Image (cartoon, rainbow, N blue to C red):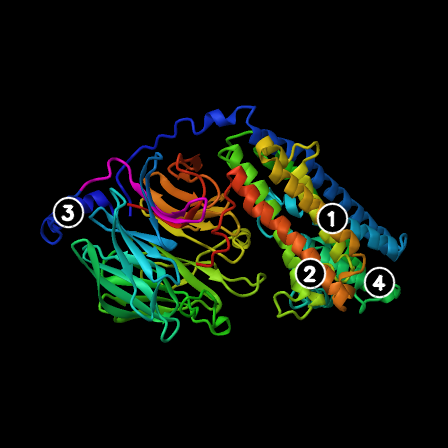
Amino acid sequence: MKRRAFLGLGGLALAATAMGGWTLIHNGPQPLLVSARNNADGKHYAVGYTLDGNEVFATQVNERCHDVVPHPQLPMALFVGRRPSTESYLIDTRTGELLQTLTSPAQRHFYGHGAFHADGQWLYATENDTSEPGRGVISAYRLQGKQLIRDHELSTHGVGPHQLLWLPDNETLVVANGGIRTEAESRVEMNLDSMEPSLVLLKRDGTLISKEQLPERMNSIRHLAIAADGTIVSGQQYMGEVTDKAPLVAIKRPGEAFQPFPLGEEQRLVMHQYTASVAINSELRLLAMTAPRGNRVFIWDLDTGAVRLDAALPDCAGVGAVEQGFVVSSGQGRCRLYDCRQPKIAVQPLQLPAGLWDNHLRLA
Amino acid sequence: MMRSPFTIALAGLALSACSQTDPQQTTSAALTEGVLVPGYSSWVETNRQLASSGAAFCADQQDLATARQAFLGAQSAWAGLQPMLVGPMGEGNLSWQVQFWPDKKNLVARQVTALLNKTPQVTPAILDKSSVVVQGLTAYEYVLYDTSIDLNDPAQKARYCPLLTAIGDHQQALSTHVLEQWQAEDGISAQLKTFPNERYAEPTEAIAELLRTQVTAIDGLKKKLGTPMGRQSKGTPQPYQAEAWRSNASMSNVSATLAGAEKIWHGANNDGIQALLGDDNKALKDKIDAAYAETRAQLATLQRPLSEMLKDEQGRKSLNDFYETLNILHRLHEGELARTLGIQLGFNANDGD
């Protein structure tokens, strides 16, 4: 989705009516990179930087966050608490002001991911029902002024949900059910011998549309990216033996079944059974993924599966699409811009602070 | 979600930090020339000896004891290389092709047997296409040392020899190829010396990777000892989960890895990581020097094979004491040293989210 186009159409009117009190301020000519980041002492921050290195905000938060969900129109973003955190933070992305500490109710904790609906009035977050550990819940929060109010819950129709995103119709939610049962205040896997990962599509009212699985039961479906044409890509983390051959990237093209993405054996091996963030550049029809155990960044042609980039980047973390291609962060080194507009991808280090970047980044 | 066009000012990222006098660049280059390239070169040499030993043994021109010595040489060189696995050897599954550990389910025995039953005449080409489990030193060790195999029996020797020679060739080819990649025009050796390049944006990133690799190897030693010591199994020793248990070389491997780690610290001419600590950090430097000396001293007292030490109280206590010195060494590098050098070792790789 082109944000500017969206703003031009519905955003302003909406903001003027349903979200009175906010002024729409553009971040200027550059996107804002938002991410969870630590400082050298291990303290947790919600940060926003322009890509040329200007710090827009760095707000200290209690708990380590995972993904960030920018509001589709307003200058705010939810920094979602990392599993098994019970806190998420709604931040003003112009100033870093903490607008709200969102606390999950008893017997719920966040899984690190969420998604704003395109209308900007609802946020959906994956949560764990710890009274029935692992039962996947999607909690719907209504935006009222500068506060998210918990409204109702849906089922993810699966166990241990992780990332969720909208299809371009803005009415269908896609959920990666990781399949792993964990208990409150714990990250210990309880059911490695009986995992149930699945890719679920559901309607906004919670009705199940489809539930698909990969053949390998221990292949946890974790992260998602969705193209403008509705193509869904997932990244897996395989919990079985290091020598097993499990598909670590999978794809569901519109109208087709969920299936392994054609991955070269060399690429699959270098991932060490572990993928982190995925992103799609819809204009360039490219798929990018970070594999921090292999310290490698990959870019593929989304349509042909051809490898466009297989590059070293120690402790690579978040990835997001920009006009030129992709921006990738690292827990250890500098962030990189991969300019993919020419046949040979050009890599440029960015003047953002090096290292300590957490798993995901978003461009708001 | 995509934003409108923008341009990024990439003007001269830390160009001033890339001059010849940058201490991190000097250290990275010195370690490359003085420690890493020599380390890889001697590893290649031990694999050349392994391949020729395998061929000689199988032609009945060398006895088993000599063949085992050649194996131990290659295995020790590989252990010494652990703190230096930056670049091609740290990527992909190449390291599995050299050694398959941990082997929780004794895959090496099963897969060697299955391979030879299916393909009695294993050739290097067949081995190249086989599982990593049978391609490397772990399979070679199994053939040379496992009590179920009697290489003095001509029939058994004939059964296992094609595999031995194929592994020798595979290891020689693999190590030679890796060294070539190191020394290629834009290879990792060049990338560790001149910045910025496709891999490293600045010298700090190279130093961070060298330190991370070294720290990972020291941490790996804790796993290699901790697993057989039963630290992951409620204190019950697991002698067959040790690295190199068949050749009784577990402790000498530890020694080789520690020596490799210390080379990264000292460098060939006191120009390793330690050179980055100025006079104001002399206390830390002394502490790390002392920690290396202590691990060496402790290790020197552990003269019995690991499997024997695991059997009695005194042996287990000595191992625990040694494990503690490793732990101190590991923490000093991971914590104080990294912090003092302003280096992030990263945290996403083992995150599980």
Disc 2 marks a residue whose amino acid type is: Asn
Who is closer to the viewer here, A149 or A362?
A149
State which tag comes first along the sequence, 4 or 1: 4
Disc 1 marks a residue whose amino acid type is: Arg
Q: Which mark is residue A22?
A: 3
Disc 3 marks a residue whose amino acid type is: Trp
Find the distance from the CA under tag 4 to the CA under tag 3. Answer: 82 Å
Circle 4 or circle 3, nearest the eye: 3
> What residue is shown with label 4?
B157
Q: Name the chain letter of the residue that bears numbered label 4.
A: B
Find the distance from the CA under tag 4 to the CA under tag 1. Answer: 39 Å
Find the distance from the CA under tag 2 to the CA under tag 3. Answer: 62 Å
> What residue is shown with label 2?
B320
Which residue does the image show at 57% across and 64% down from the upper left? Answer: A241
Indicate the secondary structure of the residue bearing disc 1.
helix
**Residue B75 in view here:** no
Disc 4 marks a residue whose amino acid type is: Lys
Q: Residues within 10 Å of mark 1 (few under 14, many from 20)?
A: some
Q: Is residue B215 magenta?
A: no
In the displayed orientation, state which residue is furthest to the bottom.
A132
